[in-house]
Image: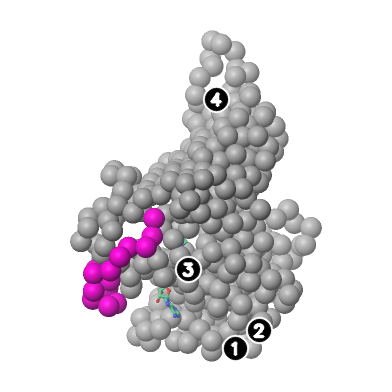
Amino acid sequence: MKKLNIGIIGYGFMGRTHSNAYRQVAKFFDTEYQPVLKAVCARSEDRVKAFADNWGYESYETDWRKLIERDDIDAIDIAAPNHLHREMAIAAAAAGKMVLCEKPLGINPSEGREMADAVNKAGVPNFVWFNYRFVPAVALVKKFVDDGKLGRIYHYRANFLQDWCIEAGVPQGGEGLWRLDVNSAGSGVTGDLLAHCIDTALWINGPIESVSAMTETFVKERMHQETGKVEEVGIDDACAFLARFKNGTLATFESSRYARGHTAGYCLELNGESASVGWKLPDLHLLSYFDDNDGSAVRGWRSIHVSQNDGEHPYMANWWVPGIVVGFEHTFTHGAYQFLKSLEDNTHDRQYSNFEDALKTDEVCAAVLESARTQSWQTIA
Ligand SMILES: NC(=O)c1ccc[n+]([C@@H]2O[C@H](COP(=O)([O-])OP(=O)(O)OC[C@H]3O[C@@H](n4cnc5c(N)ncnc54)[C@H](O)[C@@H]3O)[C@@H](O)[C@H]2O)c1
């Protein structure tokens, strides 16, 4: 097996999911490349060392520039907050490393453009961790649409709801709460959660042409953990938008962190000429499916348990026996598999978002925010 030496930046939520994926992927999937956990980087030496020991990284760094300079690293994986993606990705590409980056690509399309130009110029493989593409049930939705099972798509509906920052006493900024600080996050639910919905939608249903949005910041000021001062909140707490796809589909998207009772509720539904299909993250192995071609005696919404291992259900042949499910963490393993497969075979049907694809999501996010600001429809370039 060929070794692929990984240097990862960040050991938080995503640092863990990616590390787990690198450890699993070559054991469950047939790949020529075997990821090697070469080094992890974060600023706190005690904590990065403990992370390295726990996950089996061979070494650690506390300065990401040193990690990128190392000759023994093939791929840099960026699992750090959004405002750091641009500088890290451009430096990694300039050093000739493959670059895997968390979403959103940049905090706006001009950053995203610079990042895509950097990997293109360096000619290095690049990947963005839009992991919901790799949920077996979501990949099955894509297959249904590609196979024409739904016919013409009239409606696309997606929402991503959470409820973790309703209390005004939740601070902004710093560890764990950089998402509420516009300088680190770039935007609120739009870049954080709707970016996922948009990436999935572009992948399944093609380009979005225009959007009309509204946003709200419900809690206007929060104490900043780094300055200790009460500061204005610059992110969108909630966002809803209408969209028209190039293929004529009408769509609605919504996201909020104030939807009491929803902790991680990503849902999508497509209504086509012949059939409709729906999926939701809390039951990520199930698809709701309605087929108008069923006879009237049995016609109705059915629940498909996406766990067949005969090749009909994406990724499932590589896991357990039929009827046994996989979860959130496996989506990252599937993403790592897709990336490794495209390294060994450039004719592999690429299922992941690369930097150019993720830039398109940055562009839709920017148009959504601009539409909300100007209260006008925006056309996507
Ligand atoms: N794909 C997904 O489902 C998903 C889910 C959550 C987060 N994300 C994305 O992943 C990225 C990280 O989010 P997270 O939830 O893991 O955040 P986190 O706060 O849990 O972890 C961030 C990590 O970055 C490190 N870090 C911060 N500044 C650094 C610096 N200057 N140098 C080196 N390391 C530094 C921190 O020490 C920490 O380990 C974000 O871009 C976020 O949007 C994606």
Look at mark 3 in the image and give the residue it sits on.
82
Locate residue 242, reporting x and y percent.
51, 40
Q: Of marks 3 and 2, which one's residue comes earlier in the chain?
A: 3
Give the SS element for disc 4: strand
Mark 3 Cα-neighbour bin, 10 Å: few <14, some 14–19, many ≥20:
many
State the residue at coordinates (72%, 67%).
343
Look at mark 2 in the image and give the residue it sits on.
95
- Are the residues tagged 2 and 1 within 8 Å (C-beta)? yes
Mark 3 and mark 1: Cα distance apart in space: 22 Å
Look at mark 4 in the image and give the residue it sits on.
290
Which of the two discs, 3 and 2, sits closer to the camera? 3
Mark 4 Cα-neighbour bin, 10 Å: few <14, some 14–19, many ≥20:
many
Mark 2 Cα-neighbour bin, 10 Å: few <14, some 14–19, many ≥20:
some
Res. 204 visible in picture: no
Q: Of marks 4 and 2, which one's residue comes earlier in the chain?
A: 2
State the residue at coordinates (59%, 75%).
89
275 magenta-colored: no
Residue type at the position of mark 1: Glu
Q: Of marks 3 and 1, which one's residue comes earlier in the chain?
A: 1
- Ligand 1 within 8 angstroms of badge 2 C-beta: no
Residue type at the position of mark 2: Ala
Mark 4 and mark 2: Cα distance apart in space: 50 Å
Residue extent of the magenta highlight: 223-236
Look at mark 1 in the image and give the residue it sits on.
69
Locate residue 283, reporting x and y percent.
42, 41
Kindly give the residue lying farthest to the left in the view shown.
Answer: 169
Residue type at the position of mark 4: Phe
- Ligand 1 within 8 angstroms of badge 3 C-beta: yes
